[in-house]
Image: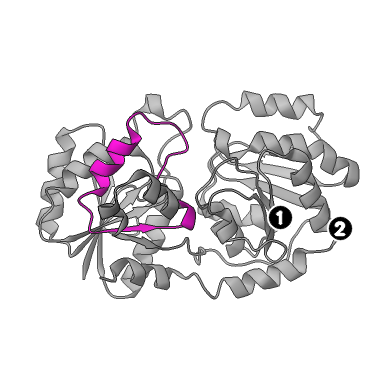
Amino acid sequence: MRIAFLGPAPPFRGGIANFANHLANEYVKQGHEICFFNFKQQYPNLLFPADAQEDNVKPEHNSLRILTPYLPHTWGKTIKAINKWHPDRLIISWWIPFFALAYGYIERRVKDCHICILAHNIKPHEDWLGTRNLLCYAFEPAEKVVVLSKSCLLELKRYLPSKIVKRAVLGFHPIYDKHVGNTDKINTDPCILFFGLIKEYKGLDVLLEAMPIILVAMPKIRLKIVGMVYGKEAPYREMIQRFKLEKAVETDFRYVNDEEISSYFKQADLCILPYKTATQSGVIATAFSYDTPVVASNVGGLSEYIEDGVNGLLVPPNDPPALAAAVIKFYGNNLLTPMQEAIKNYKKHKTWTELANLILAR
């Protein structure tokens, strides 16, 4: 079968491109032919207040850098290229309404292939004018919509008409099998990790407010913050100074590629996700791939991946004392080893093969 992907893929950075690449890897294993109809540029620089949008990596699969979603003259070129390749399936990566006009226009003009929208979010974390109309325009031509959490499915039902909801299928975020699970932590002192692209809704400020409480109970604990800041670093640096956390907190405010990820998770006993809102999270999938337990806010679809007290701990959002109590409980009850064993069992399910087959099923 010929399977086309529309949306970001390497060398673009970020969880959406990484997810698409892993899914493509699975389809290649199954003997399918893959082609990415990739972005030429993803966002205007003015709308991307962070570092470079791309990484210096060579794509693993056939990839045409052709679509710039905010430049309509590239839409026709993309349609022509897709139709020339004659895919049997077109899988579209969706997460924000910014791409709705380009996607909807292209979907309506692609010939002789089944279209599936792979929805990482439905309602965006940031407010967008006309979200409902943009969603309808992008989703209406698709024969199938695969969502990755029950939270996404509920949002789909809330925002879109029943004729589109009927096409929705509940999927999941598989654990990244590209990484090698690690149970031997190299730090002797307690170490917790905040990892991934840093946006306001991810609650790094909540974790920093919790750190003084944690340090009272655990003076030797260390927090590593690793990820590119979407916006300004200054507010986080100011909080670290205000709470006198300089000796306990190490910051690495930059994008970390696959080759570097392993070293951070080998140092960390626990990954912290103090999100204020969420659907699902690729950070959980990454943490579990290294057998690293997670403390996360009980928001969106995060509880669908974390079994409280088994492979991680759930806390209320925007609650620094509760977050601090969970971290202290993790170490006080010696939960690392039993949670690692639970994660190993969890990884036997939720596989890329299962999701890949779900997307192709008619």
Residue 267 lies within the magenta run: no
* Disc 2 element: helix
- Which quarter of the figure is the C terminus placed in? bottom left
Q: Which residues are magenta?
A: 122-151
Q: Is residue 142 above or below residue 159?
A: below
The residue singled out by tag 2 in the image is 332
* Amino acid type for the residue under numbered disc 1: Leu
In-front residue for pair 238/323: 323
In-front residue for pair 247/303: 303
Could you say which quadrant of the image residue 318 lies in?
Answer: top right
Specify few, some or many for label 1: CA neighbours under 10 Å numbering under 14, 14-19, or 20 or more.
many
* Amino acid type for the residue under numbered disc 2: Gly
Residue 139 lies within the magenta run: yes
Question: Percent position (x, y) of residue 201?
Answer: 56, 37
Could you say which quadrant of the image residue 267 lies in?
Answer: bottom right
- Which quarter of the figure is the N terminus placed in? bottom left
Relative to 114, is 172 on the left or the right?
A: right
Kindly identify the residue that appears in the image at 63 percent across and 72 percent down: 344
The residue singled out by tag 1 in the image is 270
**Which numbered disc, 1 or 2, marks the residue closer to the eye?**
2
